[in-house]
Image (cartoon, helix red, strand yellow):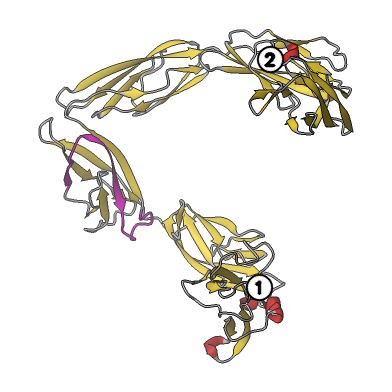
Amino acid sequence: MVYLKKILCLIFLPDGDDFYFFVLERNAQSQLFGTHFGQNGGVGDHVDGGTSRFDVNGVIYQAMCANCSGNDNNPKPAFPTTPGVWSVNNKSNSCNEAAVKIEMNFAGVSAKIQTSINAVTNDTVGCVPLKVDFSDILQKGKTFYWDFGDGNTAITNNFNTSNTYLLPGTYLVRLIAEDLTTCNVRDTAFVTITAGTNKALLDFNATKVGPCESLTYQFDNTSTNTLNIPFGPKSFYWDYGDGSPRDTAGLNPPKVHVYASPGTYKVKLFIQDDTYCNSPDSIEQTIRINPLVKARFVTPPSGCVPYTAVIENTSLGGIIFTWDFGDGSPLSNEVSPNHVYTTPGIYTIKLTAEDEFSCNKTDITTFNITVSTIPAASFTWGPDPLPANTPVQYANTSQGATNYIWEFGDGATSTEANPKYLFNSTGTFNTCLIAINSFGCRDTFCLDIPVTIIPLLDVPNAFTPGRFGANGIIKVAGFGIAKMSWKIYNRWGKVVFETSDRSAGWDGMFKGALQPQDVYTYTLDVEFSDGKKARKTGDITLIR
């Protein structure tokens, strides 16, 4: 399939200076298809800073320098474009960049398998039970027939599937991608999966070497494997977490590494030997290096019951950490624990950090947190029943809150404690009150409010700008106004004020100056919330 390009070539005949695209038979025995793309006349289209790219499905993406010549006496020739392009004309006085995409379906449907094991793309080796995710990355088929090689099969209509291998072995996976509308109908792809049982069980110990001020650590690889096959001299590599080059090693001897400065480092040990089915797996330990152990942690100072305190251990140094959460619960030795408080109160969290290799051995720090109750949101409203075109008066009866958010159900909101609100259309509106206390704890309470609005419209005929009170600004009055366009004119027909906001009004000013006492005219076009439309015209007297 050629995206409109073949059709365009029938309209714009070749002039000898175009781009030509063709498909050859296998081994270039003959040409199967050919087409061209370019303008007719003018300076020829050419690759001057242009480029060609091909994706995995053979689609051509060609950039070219195009539509170059032309002036007022000799306009540029028309350049062929397709609907939806960036521009149908060359707006430059010189050449411009043109991009062409051509896809030909002579290959028909095609298939290519991509594997993923534990989110590692293209990995095909693992340990039983081994889950492998498969994907047809060409995505050209409509139906996909999978044979996983272990007796399991699947027929899918999407590009992705998975299979779990329970027994060790080598499995040939076959995918048949099918599209009955294409020339070749089907295409087949294969991949080999190896599932093993010889798993490397990674582990290591980290020990400070030298005096308490030392920054040197020794790492002992204590890994084993399920079949007791000896590790080789290059079966592992170390990442010491400080940006130094990775260190290839065997099981022994222990590795010694000197750190440049105190800090917290994530040390990783990797298996890189395909003898073991989980290669390239890894294990990680965090070491904290500091001459003096310093207990530190961060956690939010307050929360709402039931509250899960998320604690981040930021200690300098430390090997063993003991947490007392202050609520009588058992102590914890996690490095950075989470803890649930089920009762409101003030609690003192205590961390004891121990490091036998530091100069001071132990340090303790504490921090107080407040677990707050949840406020109780509630309200009443009136008058009930609500007369037509009447504002709703809300009475806030919440307990234990300091701030409020009202959501009236029509998109409008308020932060007043006891708001009065006039709805703009007929309907039942689910009004919600969110009550918030000083610790940010929230509760929500909602009620349905039945509302009747009868569309009405009016405009006052006089106002006194520059004075305080309701008469200082003139506004449109009415009910159920969904949209409006209001314009006010002076005696010369000049628009001195206009708005589409039904809550906005004119204060008598125009271009920073208070307008003279006079009679002004207006036009007001309105669409009500029930869909009906109205126009009102009249006079307004500005009194000074």
Q: Position of residue 288 (x, y in %)?
A: 25, 33
Q: Eyeballing the image, is 276 above or below 44?
A: above
Along the line of sight, the residue nearer the viewer: 181 or 129: 181
The residue range painted magenta reads 254-280
* Amino acid beneath label 1: Pro
1 and 2 marks in contact (CB < 8 Å): no
Q: Residue at x 63, y 11 (%)?
A: 376
Q: Mark 1 or mark 2: which is in front?
A: 2
Q: Quadrant of the C terminus?
A: top right
- Quadrant in which residue 198 is drawn: bottom left
Along the line of sight, the residue nearer the viewer: 247 or 453: 453
Q: Does the segment drawn in magenta span residue 262?
A: yes
Along the line of sight, the residue nearer the viewer: 264 or 351: 264
Q: Closer to the N terminus: mark 1 or mark 2?
A: 1
Q: Residue at x 59, y 83 (%)?
A: 22
What's the mark number on residue 80?
1
Q: Eyeballing the image, is 246 above or below 43?
A: above
Q: Residue at x 17, y 47 (%)?
A: 254
